[in-house]
Image (cartoon, rainbow, N blue to C red):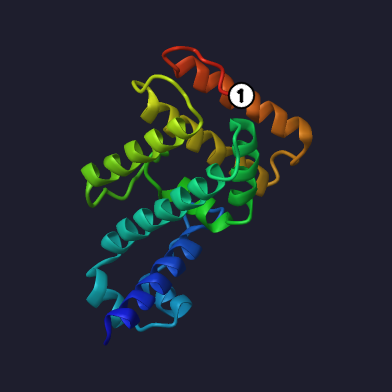
């Protein structure tokens, strides 16, 4: 099997895992057999690539964050104000419900009763620190001490907000968007060393 074919199979397996795990019900007991059927590959191939479901969930978690950070960076490169980023990124999350629910159900950085262990905690932390530095330097935020905490706060708030909208707990209204921007702005500024407003 060529490298390109293997990479394509891996993407299909990971996307199928995220789709099945990205249910609004976090207790859904989906199996590797379900993942094989969804991705169109054999269960044997899944086990030959990932050995067990725990390893597969670890890789799906990492892949999910890769999709999130890629979406966030693309949006950040096309806006100049934090509120514009918040609204555009929330829109992106709403059209990717499987990513939202998978992250809320299984992803790291979101509290869970039971959590899939990280395959490589140092690499995951390094990626988050790199993203935090990129994002807040992009918006010319001063001070670096709280960057990682600020990035985590921003992602968690937007993920929970997207989950609430997708589950119809709240209507997606201008008032909701304004309150969300205010909440994020105040939260970030409370963590920001220089207390420089982020909405300018």
Question: As displayed, is residue 104 above or below residue 83?
Answer: below
Location of mark 1 (residue): 199
Residue at 61% from the left image edge and 24% from the top image edge: 199
Relative to 111, residue 119 above or below? below
Q: Quadrant of residue 176?
A: top right
Query: Does residue 161 appear anywhere in the picture?
Result: yes
Residue 34 placement (x, y as % from top left): 44, 74
Residue 172, horizontal then vertical, whole percent: 74, 41
**In this image, 170 relative to 136: left or right?**
right
Tell me residue 125's x, y (percent). Answer: 28, 40
Relative to 140, 50 lies left or right: left
Residue drawn 71% across the image and 29% down it:
178
Instruction: Give the residue furthest to the top.
Output: 194
Q: What is the quadrant of residue 95 in the picture?
A: bottom right
Q: Residue at x 53, y 53 (%)?
A: 25
Q: Which x, y percent locates residue 43?
A: 33, 80
Query: Circle 1 sits in a helix, a strand or a loop, which is it?
Result: loop
In-front residue for pair 133/90: 133
Task: Please name whichever residue, 49 or 138, is drawn nearer the observer in this view of the structure.
Answer: 138
Residue ID at (31%, 50%):
116
Image quadrant in which the C terminus is located: top right
- Disc 1: CA contacts within 10 A as few (<14), some (14-19) or many (>=20): some
Q: Is residue 92 above or below residue 52?
A: above
């Amino acid at each position: 099997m060529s490298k390109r074919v293997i990479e394509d199979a891996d993407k299909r397996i990971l996307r199928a895992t995220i789709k099945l795990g990205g249910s609004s019900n976090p207790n859904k007991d989906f199996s590797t057999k379900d993942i094989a059927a969804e991705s169109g590959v054999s269960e044997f191939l899944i086990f030959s690539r990932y050995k067990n479901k725990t390893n597969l969930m670890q890789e799906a978690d990492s892949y999910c964050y890769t999709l999130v950070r890629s979406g966030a960076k693309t949006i950040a490169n096309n806006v100049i104000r934090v509120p514009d980023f918040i609204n555009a990124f929330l829109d992106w999350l709403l059209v990717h419900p499987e990513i939202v629910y998978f992250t809320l159900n299984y992803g790291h950085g979101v509290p869970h009763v039971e959590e899939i262990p990280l395959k490589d905690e140092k690499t995951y932390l390094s990626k988050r620190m790199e993203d935090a530095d990129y994002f807040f330097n992009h918006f010319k935020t001063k001070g670096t001490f709280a960057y990682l905490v600020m990035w985590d706060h921003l992602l968690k708030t937007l993920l929970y907000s997207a989950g609430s909208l997708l589950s119809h707990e709240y209507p997606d209204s201008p008032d909701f968007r304004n309150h969300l921007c205010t909440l994020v702005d105040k939260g970030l500024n409370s963590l920001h060393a220089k207390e420089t407003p982020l909405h300018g």
